[in-house]
Image (spheres, grey):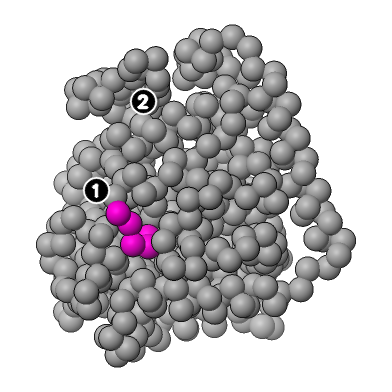
């Protein structure tokens, strides 16, 4: 579809969904959140303390764990049928965690606090079990490959699946005989391709990392100095998702197709099993200590950082690609949301409502296969939006032609209107339509963008990025500590923490055999 031309395929498909007259056709899909936050000291430095025992075992707790660093908390919600319940659970988890941190705070920004180097970021520890050691060695590999500071970046991941009653209707619209797992997987891959085309909109609307501590930016090309310890991009939206963050030069060389699930799994497996000379020079086991899980392009599939992933909940001992190969795509994981500095929960229900509508739009829209040339343009678009997305008159590449970001966004907002009407059918609150209007307003008032708001506040106050983040961290802690936890709920959370610690202790005591044998079985999919 060229420029601002009407997407007739999308219009026909939406009309068919409306004519199906299935109540709440798009409502009730499952969704979840994974929210990362650094623990920091009252002086704004990364915490060097162990993962607090009062919140349980990072290896075994179902909802409170760590990402790369011992200081990088990750909170994982249960699957939820609506965004209000989802956000309420995240608030509960954060309120509980804050009560156990003493004088430590949760860093509210995606880009990390002031760091003195890679050694400042302690690798997460998961105990003596083979499974715990596997997770620790994987993180050592990340340190040797990309550096520790790169792994201190935080974000919010939104997991989403369409409701089960949608698929038979969608199969009929697509004139497909059966709404089986192959059809569902193919539909989700349609969504992934369209997210590569249009997902820059998420970074433009919700990017909240235009500034960072100078200690993080070894290469500050294109950034301006501010105060003594801060640099920022004058028109940046999300430095986290730029070449300064996850899209660094090492990861940019990994190409994984989303033209089909088979192609996706093929490319991932190739990367996981192809030796990479720079990583071979690191060594796998040196002087009796494992430095990485392997010397291949990727240690495991999760090392590939993509803006969106197809996912299926794995069985015990199963790797992500093995789960997908076994039973197909179950949901998608959107990974481009920065932490919203101005929200105590780092994300708002309005953002989640909009993102849900956008994912549905991207599934329903026509989604041709991606060529290498188009993919290069899309990668450049994403980088350009993250680095200079607020520049006046910014042009992106679409189908080989230049198109103004504002015109492209306006067309997407127009198409989203139809999706939000379907989502709001029978719901007098009109919440999805309101979420859409709130984002559409940013086209006319770009100062409403969180990246613009953060930058303006820095410039107006003349404060360091670290000072801004600490001020907001303290305000958010006050909100979270004031959040009431019913005695029964608090007791449940405390019991979960205790049970997770006991489970890890049992796993530590039950270790048998050589870790090298376990590693071989695990990477081959034979570990249980």
Determine if residue 173 is in view.
no
Please tell me whether residue 92 is drawn above or below residue 298 in the rendered image: below
- Residue 291: mark: 2
- In the image, is 225 to the left or to the right of 316? left
Which mark is nearer the camera, 2 or 1? 2
Q: Which residue is label 1 attached to?
A: 248
Query: Is residue 111 a member of the stretch shown in magenta?
Result: yes
Query: Residue at left 24%, top 56%?
Result: 244
Query: Is residue 232 a member of the stretch shown in magenta?
Result: no
> Where does the magenta region start and end?
110-116
- In the image, is 54 to the left or to the right of 238? right
Disc 1, SS: loop
Whole-percent x, y for residue 267 in the image: 33, 30
Pick whichever, 467 or 499, lies toward us. 467
- Specify which label sits upstream in the sequence, 2 or 1: 1
Farthest-out residue, right: 488
Q: Residues within 10 Å of mark 2 (few under 14, many from 20)?
A: many
Pick whichever, 103 or 37, lies toward us. 103
Q: Residues within 10 Å of mark 1 (few under 14, many from 20)?
A: some
Query: Residue at left 70%, top 51%?
Result: 54
Query: Residue at left 64%, top 72%?
Result: 480
Pick whichever, 309 or 10, lies toward us. 309
Please tell me whether residue 369 is drawn above or below residue 89 in the rendered image: above
Q: Looking at the figure, which quarter contains the N terminus?
A: bottom left
Disc 2, SS: loop
Whole-percent x, y for residue 507 in the image: 68, 25
Pick whichever, 527 or 79, lies toward us. 527
Q: How many marks?
A: 2
- Residue 66: mark: none
Determine if residue 493 is in view.
yes
């Amino acid at each position: 579809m060229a420029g601002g031309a009407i997407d007739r395929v999308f219009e026909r498909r939406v009309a068919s969904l409306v004519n199906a007259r299935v109540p709440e056709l798009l409502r009730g899909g499952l969704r979840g959140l994974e929210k990362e936050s650094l623990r920091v000291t009252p002086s704004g430095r990364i915490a060097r303390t162990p993962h607090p025992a009062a919140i349980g075992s990072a290896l075994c707790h179902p909802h409170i764990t760590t990402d790369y660093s011992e200081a990088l908390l990750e909170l994982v919600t249960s699957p939820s049928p609506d965004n209000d319940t989802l956000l309420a659970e995240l608030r509960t988890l954060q309120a509980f965690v804050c009560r156990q941190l003493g004088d430590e705070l949760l860093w509210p920004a995606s880009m990390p606090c002031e760091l003195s180097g890679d050694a400042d970021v302690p690798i997460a520890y998961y105990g003596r079990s083979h499974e715990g050691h596997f997770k620790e060695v994987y993180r050592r590999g990340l340190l040797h490959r990309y550096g520790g500071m790169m792994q201190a970046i935080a974000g919010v991941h939104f997991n989403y699946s369409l409701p089960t009653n949608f698929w038979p209707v969608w199969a009929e619209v697509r004139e497909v005989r059966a709404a089986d797992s192959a059809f569902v997987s193919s539909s989700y891959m349609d969504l992934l391709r369209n997210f590569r085309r249009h997902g820059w909109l998420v970074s433009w609307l919700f990017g909240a990392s235009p500034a960072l501590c100078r200690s993080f930016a070894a290469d500050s090309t294109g950034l301006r100095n501010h105060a003594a310890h801060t640099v920022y991009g004058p028109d940046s939206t999300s430095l986290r998702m730029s070449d300064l963050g996850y899209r660094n030069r090492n990861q940019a060389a990994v190409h994984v197709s989303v033209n089909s699930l088979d192609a996706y799994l093929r490319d991932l497996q190739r990367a996981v099993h192809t030796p990479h000379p720079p990583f071979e020079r690191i060594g796998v086991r040196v002087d009796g200590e494992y430095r990485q899980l392997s010397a291949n392009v990727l240690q495991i599939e999760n090392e590939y950082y993509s803006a969106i992933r197809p996912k299926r909940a794995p069985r015990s001992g199963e790797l992500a690609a093995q789960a997908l190969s076994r039973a197909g795509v179950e949901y998608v994981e959107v990974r481009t949301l920065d932490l919203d500095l101005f929200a105590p929960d780092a994300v708002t229900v309005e953002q989640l409502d909009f993102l849900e509508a956008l994912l549905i739009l991207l599934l329903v829209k026509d989604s041709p296969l991606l060529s290498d040339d188009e993919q290069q343009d899309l990668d450049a678009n994403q980088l350009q939006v993250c680095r200079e997305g607020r520049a006046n008159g910014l042009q992106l590449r679409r189908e080989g032609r230049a198109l103004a970001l504002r015109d492209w966004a306006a067309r997407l907002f127009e198409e989203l209107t139809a999706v939000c009407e379907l989502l709001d059918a029978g719901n007098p609150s009109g919440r999805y339509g309101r979420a859409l209007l709130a984002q559409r307003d940013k086209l006319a008032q770009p100062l409403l963008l969180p990246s613009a708001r953060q930058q303006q506040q820095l410039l107006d106050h003349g404060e360091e990025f670290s000072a801004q983040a600490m001020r907001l961290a303290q305000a958010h802690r006050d909100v979270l500590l004031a959040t009431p936890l019913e005695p029964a709920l608090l007791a449940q959370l405390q019991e979960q923490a205790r049970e997770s610690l006991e489970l890890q202790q049992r796993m530590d005591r039950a270790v048998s055999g050589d870790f090298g044998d376990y590693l071989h079985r695990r990477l081959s999919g034979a570990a249980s």
